[in-house]
Image (tube, helix red, strand yellow):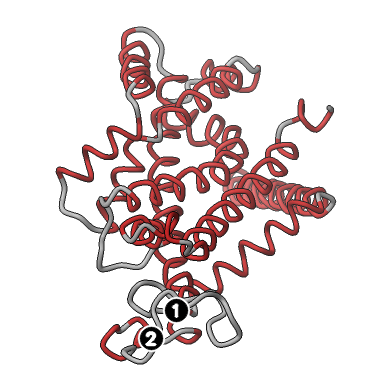
Amino acid sequence: MSETQTRPANTREYRNGKSRRVNVARQRKLQRLKEVAKEFAEHRAAMVALVFLLVISLIAVFAPLIAPESMLNVTKLLDVPHFAPPSWEHPFGTDHQGREIWVRMVWGARTSLVVGLAATAMSMIIGTVVGLAAGHFTGLAGGIIMRVVDFFLVLPSLILAIVLSSVLSRGVLTIVIAIGVTSWAGTARVVRSQTLSVASRTYVERAEVLGGGHWHIISKHLLPAVMPLVLANTTLTVGSAIIAESTLAFLGLGDTTQQSWGTVLKNAMDVSAATSGYWWYIMIPGIAIVMVVLACTLVGRAFESITNPMLRRN
């Protein structure tokens, strides 16, 4: 009788203890998020950059409402002057077909941001998985993984992206794949370095001694420890991905049916805008690319200084 009563009591105590531990862990994570948000708010330049990125993102999302797609239809723009300079009637000027530059910039923001975010996500996923595997597994397996990483590091990423874009069918997905496949090696090397540092800590060694499997150690100990570094690197990679997309589009390897900032620059080059005095045709998309990349860099650097104890101390 006493043994029967003891088992439910022990089970109930175990469940209550587990629930308390989960709540404590959740409260700690929430408290850490609040601290990160507070520290990030102290970086004024990063806050301005974040607001700017949010505005650009909203413009990209609501592009059909801000500038209907019919405004890009050249058959409806027969009366609009070509190469009109910026004015009250044409705020950013017009292109060689009479299309408003600001309309093309609004629609181009969609392609540039989608490609930048999607390619960055692919690069981060591949780099994180490979970096964790290279740092956790030792011996022959780890050596083979690192040789693959080194191979992609020494390859010129832009040339490889150009080759992939030339071989595959043109489109936004092709550019995403080309950028994502060629830009993960740097992330993998950084994640591997952090993984090796975390793997040498006492609680990870204790988990291995107690019989924790590879999946348990990677998912419960290594991945949470490297995620802040991955997130900080993500914001920095978005800017690089946008530059890569603009470069591929400028070289004529993008989707000509989709508006992007690189496509605007490509059209400007085709009509010799730089030597013909149509400065707005080049300056506006160029400044937009520079500002978005700079904003991503400022946000990434601020987040990196928060998550990296060494940088925070300095």
Count of numbered labels shown in the rendering:
2
Give the label on residue 71, or none: 2
Q: Is residue 132 above or below residue 165?
A: above
| Mark 2 vs 1: CB contact within 8 A | yes
| Left/right of residue 153 with respect to residue 200 in the rendered view | left
Between discs 2 and 1, the one toward the N terminus? 2
Q: Along the line of sight, which residue is nearer the eye, 203 or 78? A: 78
Q: Along the line of sight, which residue is nearer the eye, 146 or 60? A: 60
Image position, residue 194 (x, y; %): 57, 24
- Specify the farthest residue to the front: 276
Residue depicted at 51% across the width and 61% down the height: 279
Q: Is residue 31 above or below residue 3?
A: below
| Left/right of residue 38 with respect to residue 285 in the rendered view | right
Residue depicted at 29% across the width and 83% down the height: 74
Q: Along the line of sight, which residue is nearer the eye, 190 or 151? A: 151
Mark 2 lies on a secondary structure that is helix
Give me the C-alpha separation between circle 2 and circle 1. Answer: 8 Å
Q: Residues within 10 Å of mark 1 (few under 14, many from 20)?
A: many
Res. 92 image quadrant: bottom right
Image position, residue 53 (x, y; %): 61, 61
Residue depicted at 14% across the width and 43% down the height: 167
Quadrant where the C terminus lies? top right
Q: Residues within 10 Å of mark 2 (few under 14, many from 20)?
A: some
Image position, residue 309 (x, y; %): 76, 29
Residue depicted at 69% across the width and 43% down the height: 303
Type of amino acid at the residue the image marks with label 1: Glu
Give the labeled residue for mark 1. 100
